[in-house]
């Protein structure tokens, strides 16, 4: 059994490079994004957002990513984050 089979419980996985897909297959990328946003809108998928920070905090976010151990996504906002924008612990 290969390492990836062991890690994924025998399920198949397809790795998706969003930047490459957008550049090499723009129409397929647009269809993929429409499907993704449809799933979000319908509540079929539930991304875990652990924090929302202003774009000015991007270097801090990269440091947190590099350190590892994040339990979800960090959303960068184009405007300053208020106290109500931060994700609350579960």
Image: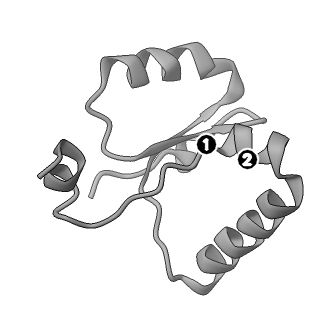
Q: Are marks 1 and 2 in contact (CB under 8 Å)?
A: yes
Q: Answer above or below: position of 16 versus 39.
A: above
Q: Percent x, y for residue 38? A: 69, 79
**At x 22% / y 57%, what residue is drawn?**
8
How crowded is the residue under tag 2: few (<14 C-alpha within 10 Å), some, or many (20+)?
some
- In the image as oriented, which residue stretches furthest toward the right? 27
Which residue occupies the foreground of this view, 37 or 55? 37
- How is this picture coloured? one colour
- Location of mark 2 (residue): 21
**At x 87% / y 53%, what residue is drawn?**
26
**At x 40% / y 21%, what residue is drawn?**
64
Q: Percent x, y for residue 66? A: 39, 18
Local SS, label 1:
loop
Q: Quadrant of residue 10?
A: bottom left
Which residue occupies the foreground of this view, 12 or 44? 12
Q: Is residue 30 left or right of residue 81?
A: right
How crowded is the residue under tag 1: few (<14 C-alpha within 10 Å), some, or many (20+)?
few
Local SS, label 2:
helix
Which residue occupies the foreground of this view, 57 or 23? 23
Query: What is the count of numbered marks?
Result: 2
Q: Is residue 60 left or right of residue 25?
A: left
The Cα–Cα distance between marks 1 and 2, rounded to whole angstroms, is 6 Å
Q: Quadrant of the C terminus?
A: bottom left
Q: Answer above or below: position of 50 versus 32.
A: above
Q: Percent x, y for residue 47? A: 47, 61
Q: Answer above or below: position of 61 versus 43.
A: above
- Location of mark 1 (residue): 17
């Amino acid at each position: 059994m290969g390492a990836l089979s062991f890690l994924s419980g025998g399920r198949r996985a397809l790795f998706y490079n969003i930047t490459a897909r957008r550049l090499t297959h723009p129409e397929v990328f647009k269809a993929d994004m429409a499907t993704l946003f449809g799933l979000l809108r319908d509540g079929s998928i539930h991304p875990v957002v652990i924090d929302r920070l202003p774009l000015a905090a991007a270097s801090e976010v990269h440091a947190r990513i590099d350190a590892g151990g994040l339990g979800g996504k960090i959303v960068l906002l184009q405007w300053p984050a208020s106290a109500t924008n931060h994700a609350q612990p579960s």
